Image (tube, coloured by chain):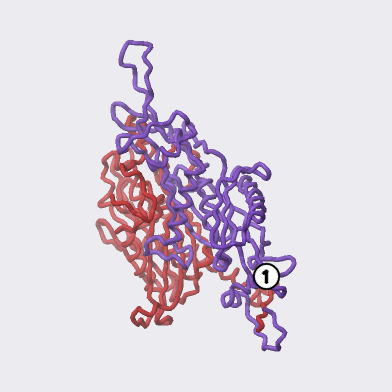
Amino acid sequence: MATTQSAPTLTFPRPIFAALSPSPFLQAHLAPKNPIRANARAPTEFRKPGLNTGSLTHCNGSAVVRLGNTTVVCGVRAEVLRAEDVPQPIDPKADEEDDVEEIDTLRLLVPNVELSTGSTPTFLPGQAPSTFAQSLITRIRSLLLSTRLVRAKDLRIMYTPPRTTEDEDEEVQPEVKAYWTLYIDTMFISLDGDAFDAAWGAILAALRNTMLPASDWDQDLEMVLCDDDVKKARKLELRGLPVAATFAVFQGEEDEEGEDRSWVLSDPDAFEEGVCRESVTIVVDGKKGSGKIRRIEKSGGTVVGREVMKGLIRRSEERWEEWNAVLKG
Amino acid sequence: MIDDRRRINPPSGGTSAPVFARTVKEPEYLPSLRPTRERGPNDLRKIFLQTGIVPSASGSAYLEIPITQSKTTSLIPPRSSLKIACAVHGPKPLPRSAPFSPHLLLTTTVKFAPFATRNRRGYIRDSAERDLGVHLETALRGVLIGERWPKSGVEVIVTIIEGDEDAWWGDSFEGGRGGAGGGWGLLNVLAGCITVASAAIADAEIDCVDMVSGGVAAVVQDQENGKEASRLVVMDPCPSEHRDILAACVVGYLPSRDEITELWFKGDAGAPPEELIEKATHAAAASMSVLREVVLEAVQAKFQGQLPEFKGKSKRKNDQPDVEMTG
């Protein structure tokens, strides 16, 4: 970049420099010994999550999550799916831990994401969901299912029919009369990078906030009736607390010795996402040293190898502690 | 229902909202949940307004009319609050394919979030949302000085995170009248949309003749002790608090010029409707006082350190020097 030729120097205000040549702009920030990104964060620094739960009136659970300039609202709404409306009934397996198939086939979790709310100039309303929005929601759904976060047991509405015969020994089997279907709607109010982490954090917080009313099958009316008493409502028992951490890899220009320079940036903002091609998303559950890896997604480049990945997992575990404190606090 | 292949679809068998046992089985329980208006007829609900919530947009604002609710033991919310976010993108050049336009082209989009109302809404815009968009456009077009931006367009995008209801939810249960035609909540939502869009346009620094604000008034007939009460004109009606709304009116009003850019009148007001419109403009003027204060505060924050009287206490965060670009 810096040449010794006596070329006329140009001075630009920061935003214009960033818009004209984004890559050298970011490199100019990262090249010094103590690199500070253009958004005044260190390369390994995440944005501190801000959380507010239970603010939506018509939802069973809701959360607003802020990551810097990214703001997401998530509302979980439970509706009743009658067992007789299910085309192919699925018998619950004996092993309660193996319930993904039931939730997946019956489509009991319906997550959706809306980006074209004016949250960013890239996605304006009036068009079909962009490829980005579609892939985002597919990744979220697949993560919801593969982490087995929600238990099918919590979503079943059971009914034990009264004894019909005098026989005292006859076992009366409880039967599944209906299911709770959870609509998980996520609206982006403002988007400044790292959509996945923000959306996942909001969904996780909203599910933790969700209260399902006590429900029972009414034999006379042949419908599910719920109790509106707050005290009788129950929370979902989630399996673990998987937290997502996204990294972007910035590949700068070669330095004087001809060596490649690259930096792995935690929690990239929209500007950095525009410059970086390689990205890694790691989902971990558990604090440093004892964290379980629930998912690794990596695409776009070749910088992150085994050694770098180990470091990233450590950074994800640190991130888990941050989210854990926010979600449980 | 046809599956939308670009989104995750609900179960094909269809789902229904939960039904609460006590509302079905105990006939006296349902009426006990009915909310009543505790404000005076000329008192407005408190408005919270903030600008600059979407940094990547040229202007944005958020409006909330919170519900004052004591701790309840029921899971059924008695009424709804109003939460609206608005983002303005532009003015920016029109695409090359667009025909020449001598003035600024305004596009307004109003969309309810799926969780905005008691009944879940879809992701694809319905006719009510399109209708609101057109009403909002008329209200805003009257204030923008469009001639200053030939060949450009501006997008005003309004997201309703929570909207007012058309009537008390229990009325559909009881088979009540629910007012003439219903749809009263849309008027409140439109008034909120006008106010929040006006704040966002001011935040985007688009030239206007004045700021416009929305206000609603309604003719209601409430029952008291089983007897039909006389007609009453109320400002800022919350539809779930009234048994019968006979007529309602929303205006987009410019208080300092005393002009109306948008008027939407519904129902049968009986005697001359001027009183109703008059009250609606009063409501608009009241929300204008909030709007004016918020916009003024935002401008002060924006120009801190640039205006001479603020120079002493410069608090700009990005006080970084320019970057030199060589080569």
Viewer-side residue, B70 vs A78: A78
What x and y, as percent, mark residue B289?
Answer: 49, 64
Quick check: A98 above or below A249? above
Residue drawn at point x = 35 percent, y = 36 percent: B19
Viewer-side residue, A46 vs A189: A46
Residue drawn at point x = 41 percent, y = 42 percent: A104
Residue drawn at point x = 66 percent, y = 52 percent: A310
Viewer-side residue, B64 vs B106: B106
Q: Would residue B29 be visible to someone looking at this image?
A: no
- Occupied quadrant, residue A44: bottom right
Q: Label the purple chain with its letter.
A: A
- Occupied quadrant, residue B55: bottom right
What x and y, as percent, mark residue B99?
Answer: 33, 80
User: What colour denotes chain B?
Assistant: red
Mark 1 lies on residue: A29
Viewer-side residue, B68 vs A92: A92
Quick check: B30 above or below B56? above
Which element is circle 1 on?
Answer: helix
Which residue is farthest right? A33
Q: How many labels does the image show?
A: 1
Give the amino acid type for the residue marked by disc 1 in the picture: His
Quick check: A282 above or below A174? below
Mark 1 falls within which chain? Answer: A
What x and y, as percent, mark residue B41?
Answer: 40, 52
Query: Position of B287 compared to A312: left or right?
Result: left
Residue drawn at point x = 37 percent, y = 30 percent: A176
Q: For the residue carrying disc 1, how many other residues have a C-alpha within 10 Å: few (<14), some (14-19), or many (20+)?
A: some
- Quarter of the picture containing the C terminus of chain B is bottom right
What x and y, as percent, mark residue B248?
Answer: 31, 57
Q: Would residue B9 be visible to someone looking at this image?
A: yes
